[in-house]
Image (cartoon, helix red, strand yellow):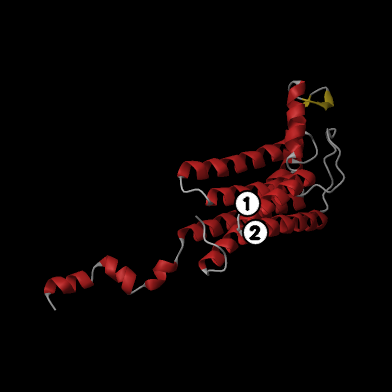
Amino acid sequence: MDPIDRTASLSPSRFDIDRVPVLRKIEVRGLVILGLVSASLFGFLTIAGEVREGDTHAFDDAILRALRSPTDPADPIGPFWVEAIMRDLTALGGYTVLALLTVLAVTYLLMKGKRASALLMGVAMMGGVMLSNVLKIGFDRQRPDVVAHLVDVHSLSFPSGHAMLSATAYLTLGALLARGERGFVMRSYFMGVAIALTLLIGASRVYLGVHYPTDVLAGWCAGSAWALLCWWVARWLQRRGSVEPST
C-alpha cells in the first residue's frame, strides 16, 4: 500500500467511523433530554425533602404575605385587573381546559395521520393526572392558611396540580408542534410559548393564595420530568422505527 494511503487509513475521522461504530449511535439530543429529566427529578426530590422536614414554611409564608396588603390578608397587591388576569391564567391549567386541549390536539394529530404523536399526547396527559394525584395523596399537604384563597380549591396542595399538568400539557404540545418545524425560530417560538404559559399558570396559583411557592416549584419539576421522559421514550421508539419520523 502507498504510504499516503496508509496515513489516510489511520486518520482520526476514518478511525471514528470504522473502528468505533458505536459512536454513531449516540444521539446528543437524547442525552440532553435524559440530563434534563435527571435535573428535574433532582429538583423535585430536593424540594420534597425540604417540605417533609418543614424547612420551607418561612420561605413559603413570606412570599404569600408579600403578595397581600399588609393590613388585609384577603386583599392582593396590585390593581383590581391584576387579580382578574390571574384568575383567567389559572383557568388555563384547570382540568376542563387541559382536557379540552388534549382532546383537540389528539384529534388533530389523528386527522394528520400522526397516530404515535397522538398516543404520546394522550399518554402524557393521562399519566400526568394519575401521577399528580398519587403524589398529592402521598405527601398529604394541606392548602395554605396564612392568606385568604381567591379561588375555590378542594384538593391537597403538594405538588401543585395546575403547575404540574400545565407543564406536562403545554411542554408536550409545544414539543410536538416544534417537531414539525425545520427553522430554529419557529421551534423556539413554540417552546417559548409553552414555557411562558407554564410559568404564568404556576405563578397565578401563588398569587391567588391557593398554593405555597414550593408546591408550584415541585409541580414544575415533576411535570417537566414527566413530559421530557415521555418525549425521550418517543424518540427512542422513533429510532427503532416504531413510530413515524419527525419532519
Frontmost residue, 203 versus 239: 239
Tell me the element at label 2.
Answer: helix
Quadrant placement of the N terminus: bottom left
Q: Which residue is mark 2?
A: 120
| Numbered circle sitting on residue 10 | none
Q: Earlier in the sequence, mark 1 or mark 2?
A: 2
Residues at circles 1 and 2 in contact by the CB criterion of under 8 Å: yes
| Numbered circle sitting on residue 172 | 1
For disc 2, the neighbor class at 10 Å (few under 14, some 14 to 19, many from 20) is some
The correct choice, above or below, for 83 with respect to 2 in the image is above
Frontmost residue, 180 versus 51: 180
Q: Residue 66: where, in percent of width, then height?
A: 74, 29
Is residue 132 in sight in this rendering? yes
What is the tally of numbered marks visible in this picture? 2
Q: Residue 222: where, in percent of width, then height?
A: 68, 53
Give the residue type that dot 2 points to.
Leu
Give the residue type that dot 1 points to.
Thr
How far, Cα to Cα, is label 1 from label 2?
A: 8 Å
- What residue do we see at 65% from left, 46% from top? 170
Frontmost residue, 180 versus 192: 180
| Residue found at the far left of this picture | 2
Q: Residue 38: where, in percent of width, then height?
A: 59, 58
Question: Does 66 sit left or right of 36 as displayed?
Answer: right
Quarter of the image where one finds residue 22: bottom left
Question: Does 192 sit left or right of 165 as displayed?
Answer: left
Q: Residue 117: where, in percent of width, then height?
A: 61, 58
Is residue 160 in sight in this rendering? no
- What residue do we see at 13% from left, 70% from top? 4
Tell me the element at label 1.
Answer: helix
Quarter of the image where one finds residue 148: top right
- What residue do we see at 77% from left, 58% from top? 130
For disc 1, the neighbor class at 10 Å (few under 14, some 14 to 19, many from 20) is many
